[in-house]
Amino acid sequence: MEKILVIGAAGQIGSELVMALRKIHGNDNVFATDLKQAPDDVINSGPFQILDVMDDKRLIHFVIRNKITQIYHLAAVLSGNAEKLPIQAWEINMQSLMNILDLAREVDEIKKVFWPSSIAVFGPTTPRVNTPQLTVMEPNTVYGISKLAGERWCEYYNKRYGVDVRSIRYPGLISYKTEAGGGTTDYAVDIFYEAIKTGKYECFLKEDTALPMMFMDDAINATINLMEAPADKISTHSSYNVGGISFDPKQLANEIKKHIPEFEITYKPDFRQPIADSWPQSIDDSFSQTEWDCSAKFDIKKLTETMLNGVKAKFEEK
Ligand code: NAD
Ligand code: AKB
């Protein structure tokens, strides 16, 4: 029986991943942890504890006491927030990963680790359309640099110490359960809240800034598929490309207008525009697809409908 630790369980991905893992492995076998309180369903359906991933001593005690066999390490400072405090972001993103990799090396019971990378590993010199798995990688954001360095460390710990660490370069993730965590792709979440609340949205990216995106359900399925794939199918322990869908703010606004015809969008690019301009517009995940299933079911139409209904229901609950 697996005993799973999720670090960053109060965040955008963690809050949904914990619930999906509890359905598969049983509520009591999935330990949710974060620096802050998680949503009610996470706290009420199984174990939840405040735990700082930077505190390696408490972390190792927690892992041994609860006989943890798998770790999903999701805590990080995302691209937009990282540019505001680059050195602190580097410290958190790198040291937390090193704590987890060392733990997995030292504790025999830990059989698998999941750590997410990002499309931010690519940079302005990378081919931006259908970006392949192997290509030029010269990220120019502190977040992207930390993710690229993290990928190299994951591969190193796999080759040198046999740690079975698996990773996805997530595109921008879109969901309504928990707020997005300070990234460059967050406009594609915020836009739905403002569309419903005020009928207007001022976008911090230009209208034609295409980026790869994915609805959360598809991201969770891809993550679980990767973690459940047999070890002999998994050739890559740095990180895998995952494509999702690609659109720009104008296309998303037009999709929203099909449901809210009076919706208005304006554009006021800020410091996140150059970050977005340095990232791919679309991702080629054909290599990943040969080893495990990372296909997306949500297109822009289904994603828009689901987000509008989900955000509306959230406002009605309040
Ligand atoms: P998030 O900011 O919503 O959640 C991160 C969580 O980690 C937060 O709840 C935060 O409180 C927690 N955390 C921060 N420092 C911590 C610490 N020291 N100890 C314990 N917990 C701590 O982020 P997210 O969107 O859920 O992203 C999770 C991971 O996925 C990150 O590594 C991120 O880089 C990666 N990722 C996310 C996206 C996306 O679009 N959401 C895309 C690519 C990669
Ligand atoms: C961000 O915008 O920082 C994240 C990501 C793509 O890694 N959503």
Image (cartoon, rainbow, N blue to C red):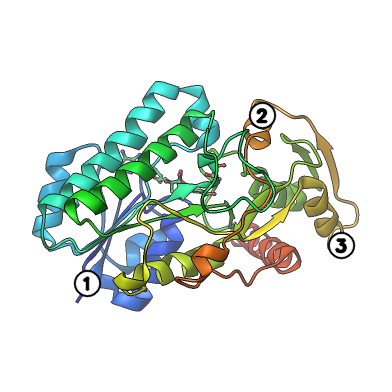
Between 61 and 212, which is closer to the camera in this rendering? 212
Q: From the viewer's perspective, is the residue at label 3 or at label 2 nearer?
A: 2
What amino acid does circle 2 point to? Answer: Pro
Between 48 and 76, which is closer to the camera in this rendering? 76
* Residue 165 point in image, percent of width and height: 30, 56
What amino acid does circle 1 point to? Answer: Glu
Q: Is residue 37 left or right of residue 175?
A: left
Q: Looking at the image, can residue 41 be seen?
A: no
Mark 3 lies on residue: 258
Residue at the spot 36% in from the left edge and 67% down from the top edge: 227
Residue at the spot 31% in from the left edge and 72% down from the top edge: 232
Sequence-wise first label, 3 or 2? 3
Q: Looking at the image, can residue 275 be seen?
A: yes
Q: Determine the image quadrant of residue 271.
A: top right
Q: Determine the image quadrant of residue 16.
A: bottom left
Residue at the spot 65% in from the left edge and 43% down from the top edge: 127
**Quarter of the figure with the N terminus:** bottom left
* Residue 78 point in image, percent of width and height: 48, 38
In space, the residues marked 3 and 1 are separated at their CA atoms by 45 Å
Between 169 and 289, which is closer to the camera in this rendering? 289
Using the image, tell me which numbered label, if any, was put on residue 274: 2
Label 1 beta carbon within 8 A of ligand 1: no
Q: 111 above or below 209?
A: below
Label 2 beta carbon within 8 A of ligand 2: no
Q: Is residue 65 left or right of residue 313?
A: left
Between 162 and 317, which is closer to the camera in this rendering? 162
Q: Are marks 3 and 2 in contact (CB under 8 Å)?
A: no
Mark 1 lies on residue: 2
